[in-house]
Image (cartoon, coloured by chain):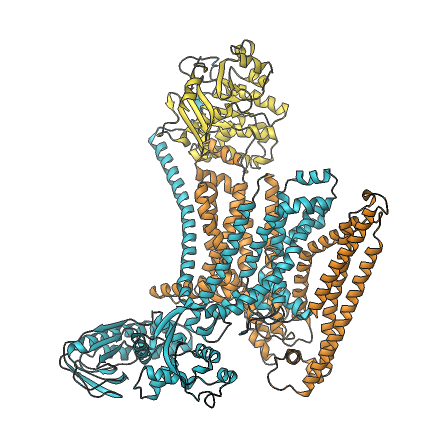
Chain colours: A cyan, B yellow, C orange
Amino acid sequence: MTDISAPNAMGVAKQRRVDVTSAAAQARVRARYRSEARFKTYGLLALGITTVFVGVLLSDILLRGLPSFWQHRLVLDVPVAADAFGPPGKADVAAIRGGDYFPITKAALANAIPGIESRSAEKQLNRLLSTGAPDELRERLAANPALIGKTVKVPLLLSDDADLYFKGGETAIVKRAPRGIATPSGVNGEITVLTASNDFSDELITIKRALAAAAARTQFESNRLLKSPDKANQTRGTELAAEAKNLSTRAELSRGEEVLDDKVPSVLIEINGGLVKANKLGDSSITGEVLLPLKSTAEAKPADWKIVTFVTPEANRKVTDQEVAFLERLRSNGAVENVFNWRFFTAGDSREPELAGVRGALVGTALTLFVTLILCLPIGVGAAVYLEEFAPKNRFTDLVEVNINNLAAVPSIVFGLLGLAVFLNFFGLPRSAPLVGGLVLALLVLPTIIIAGRAALRSVPPSIKEAALGVGASHQQAIFHHVLPLAMPGIMTGTIIGMAHALGETAPLLMIGMIAFIVDVPQSFVESATVMPVQIYLWSDLPEKAFQAKTAGAIIVLLGFLFLMNGMAIWLRKRFERRW
Amino acid sequence: MDAQVATSTHTVPRMTAGVGAKVVARDCNVFYGEKHAIKMLNVDIPDRSVTSFIGPSGCGKSTFLRCINRMNDTIPICRVTGTINIDNRDIYDPSLDVVQLRARVGMVFQKPNPFPKSIYDNVAYGPRIHGLAQSKAEMDEIVMTSLEKAGLLKEVKDRLLESGTGLSGGQQQRLCIARAIAVSPEVILMDEPCSALDPIATAKIEELIDELRSNYCIIIVTHSMQQAARVSQRTAFFHLGTLVEEGETSQIFTNPQDKRTQDYITGRFG
Amino acid sequence: MSGIYFGTIALLMIAGFVAVRGRAHALASTGAVGSRLSMHSLPMYHGLLAATLVLLPMLIVYLFGSTIVTRWSEAQALSKLPSEVATNELARGAALRDVYNILTGKFQGEPSAVLKAAAEALRNSSSLGGWLVYGLGVALAGAGLLFSFIRVNGEFRARNMFERIVKVILLLCATVAVLTTIGIVFSVLYETMRFFFDPALKGRPTVSDFLFGTEWNPQAALRADQGDIKTAFGFIPLLTGTLLITFIAICVAGPLGLLSAIYLAEYASPAFRAWAKPILEILAGIPTVVLGFFAALTVAPLIRGWGESFGLDIASESALAAGLVMGMMIIPFISSLSDDVINAVPQSMRDGSYALGATKSETIKQVILPAALGGIVSAFMLAISRAIGETMIVVMAAGLAANLTFNPLDAVTTITVQIKTILVGDQEFDSAKTLAAFALGLVLFFFTLILNVIALIIVRRNREQYD
């Protein structure tokens, strides 16, 4: 050891060394490490929550949307009467296209499910088909008029409700084998079915339970409404209280026949090739109407008949018991097929969910984005080059820079107001047109492209420009021949990201009227059109449940394009990224 | 790798200082990924004196310095083998807590790096996280004493609540020293503490180092051989990751044993 | 018409370029003015100059000409219609639509004789005007071509002239952004002025009615003669609704975004970062209309269901659902901006703290966050500005009822929702209701402008601190 001087006045004795050995010190250190671990966990948790949200969002959209890419059709033998389109053998294509197909499809359905007598049942049967059901038939007949007078096997599009039923979730169907022998009193209309043992007591209990549950639910809702200060709510609450009392009385009544309504599960009997829906339910008998006609009134042995329950009450689903009966019969006949829904990509918008497609919106989007791209790419690059290379550094360019950065954060709906006031009202450009949409979106993404362009230009080292200037190139030659090409990958990445942003933008386009219901696929830049995000918004507002799936389906298409564009940007960045 | 280590062993001189040294390194190797930055280093550093590390750029002196309070832990690709003992305790022992180690081994950096807080809070930061003061009065005392020891109190006592970043470069560096000594470390590491300062500020820092050596084991990395000669009692010369020669400062500068040391101090390379 | 015009532009540009460059080339290679080097500019620049002198005049003529022709020919068409049509804004719009439909053959049924006459007038005048514009454009382009053709000689500095033109064009490009801001301010300000001060406007409120009124019911203004105008355009409920939803959003996004940024910047290994960052980027790239759909169809019913199970009465369009999803939307903003500023804190700060024996979290909380505070504050301000201006999520998930409440379980409405509701569909530009949307737009623009500018100034100052 060398040169140790004696401790001075502020020596070791007075020094407050960090205590590392005592129990208190150890405890303090442990506490500090605990707090460290806690803090780290918070960070991980935050990321976890965000990830879960993204996962839930995407899977929710996928679950809702994927079914809309498939649709159900009925494949039936359709007899086309020889005189359906005028005198036999004289039908021309125009008559075939303009013909009335309802009688034809009606006949085909009647063939598929024979024996329907009641008018209401017949109506429900015909309602199973979409208004666009004969489209395929029409095309075939128009292409080959020789088919008129023959029976054609052709797919018919189902209505949205029928399609939804087949996609599941409407009701669970429970089938149970009985113990006794059953005797129906008729084959059609209102009949009674008697059984030799107490076969329906289980169903009766189920119904009573359902009534009790409904009573409890109604009571809860009534209590909630009664608490509200609103007068209308109060009235409704009192009504509901009475209804709840009624329901609970029915639930508590121990014996006897129960009258079924559409608020409790439906009980049906499959017997002698037909289906009977119970209106009155006793322990050993039901009275009800025939949904599918019976073949005979013969006695049925326990193995030959079944008790069927549609668990979801009729009031809570889109399809009636009668329709369920028809659909199940058609399915068991093998007439239902599930095919990829090409129409979703080839059709324009429609008020009928099963006929609606995104083609119009896709074309509108393409036209709009084309206008946006050809405007904002040259202007954005020009502005970036000017600001980065030619602009004098003074207060004005400072202001321009703040202005561009601010513009990038101005709410998009304000750009919509600008478009409305300037492009539509001042310049008199057409409403709803891709031209105006493109203009507004171009202004919207211009700041993004300018900022990305400037960053790309800045990342090119000055030595490149200096080298060009050194061999006698003009300032512009140096920039346009050397700097700009090197900055181009960065600019393209920024442009794609900007275009992806424009692709998802909705609010400003609502302002300039691109929200109209447009069936036709737009053909030019000045025709009325809509775009994907607006189409999504429009569909999400519609009450039909099938449109929810369509909306999610359209979102999947939109997200697909967005991921494609962003993927392209990432690829460009990876491929051409250069470190100087 | 092993072969490399073996061949370099015989070129490394063993320690020269006596037992009871404060910091003792034995067969110390440092790797940055594939790069072998320190090779089989052995050194003993005495307490209550100033030891300077000199050598050309990239010779590993700063790397070794950062090993002594395990600052290299913050670099993921850095790996240290061998032992470094402080008071006969291996600081790379897994059971040893790096946070407590750093409370005992303070560090001053090349560029002054005061926190963007008030002067008071800069100094109080260490005592606060280590729970050194029980009361406000005690904390005040620690801050005042540390500033006093760093020779800064006179200049800043009227503006303790102003930001530390508003001080001049030399003052900032002394603030960093005050911050380091506020937790009363046993060892203070200084990584070229004057390289970003002008000559007057440098002189003040050197004066301060000289005062501090009576209480601390100070290790200073410097590029300036004059500075090494002025402030340190012992000097170690590093070259290409190895410790070439270590000894009393006067001896290293007047009568170096190794040709490389001689070449370096006479300015033939470096 | 437009097709022919732009076709002509392309044709003249190519022809001018080829001809003028050819002439310059010939001149240079025949040695008429000596060796090639004695030409000041390369033949290509003579050609480019010619093409530019075609393009610019023709574009300018088209832009102004087509607007003027449209206006003029519509005026011609309207002059054939009864005078009450021309003065009534709604009727005028409908009549013009009819006229255009007749011209494009989309008119349903048989048009009246008056309409037919108007359509005829429109067709004639727009065709006449179109040819006038075309003639003017071609004439100017010809003059430009002639000029550049004659000026092909050794001394003419074609490159310098071309570069001067290019520079002016670049300057114009940079001005577009400024013009956009000016356009926004003026269009919104003009309609707002009319809203408050146009004496011809029925049912307009005073500025203080608007700014301090506590009831928003623009439908009332339609019945202007009977309605109580004072209570029709009270801005306060919209403000509180907007702020309530924004507050919920920030409560969600602030901690999540900031903690995510801290974890990614300080703790995460590069491999983890490579996985986690894209998740935030995906979230940032999801269009708000998709988030709105999710909020309305999934989150709102979920919250309502939870509320019911606790016996709470939650509106189906509660501020909570919209706020939560909006919070999710702005997480990526906060996290990526905060990530940037945290990374910008110099390593020496961290080293200084670690060297004193601080743990990572102590370093983060006591050194890094204070150092990055400015940037983080500005990230929050930009996120707030984004949340205030967000439209689709609130349009789809928040309600239309202008309730003056701070209860997150109630339905509230926001500024953007009201702008959208008022302006979507047919509007007449002389009703107070329509103009109210522009007043709201003005308020929105200035709110966000102030937030953005303060944030930008803070960011800039922060950047200078560490540069």
Where residue A7 appears, as percent x and y from the top left, is 47, 17
Q: Which residue is nearer to you in this view: B16 or C65?
A: C65
**Quadrant in which the N terminus of chain A is drawn:** top left
Q: Which residue is nearer to you in this view: A528 or C381?
A: A528
Q: Which residue is nearer to you in this view: B213 or A527?
A: A527
The residue furthest bottom is A87
Q: Which residue is nearer to you in this view: C127 or C395?
A: C127
Camera sees residue C254: no
Determine the residue positioned at 58% across, 60% down.
A411
Determine the residue positioned at 76% across, 69% down.
C133
Determine the residue positioned at 56% across, 76% down.
C220
Where residue C158 appears, as percent x and y from the top left, is 80, 50
Camera sees residue A547: yes
When asked about the image quadrant of residue C90, the answer is: bottom right
Where residue C370 appears, as percent x and y from the top left, is 52, 42
Where residue B265 appears, as percent x and y from the top left, is 58, 15
Left or right relative to A186: residue A550:
right
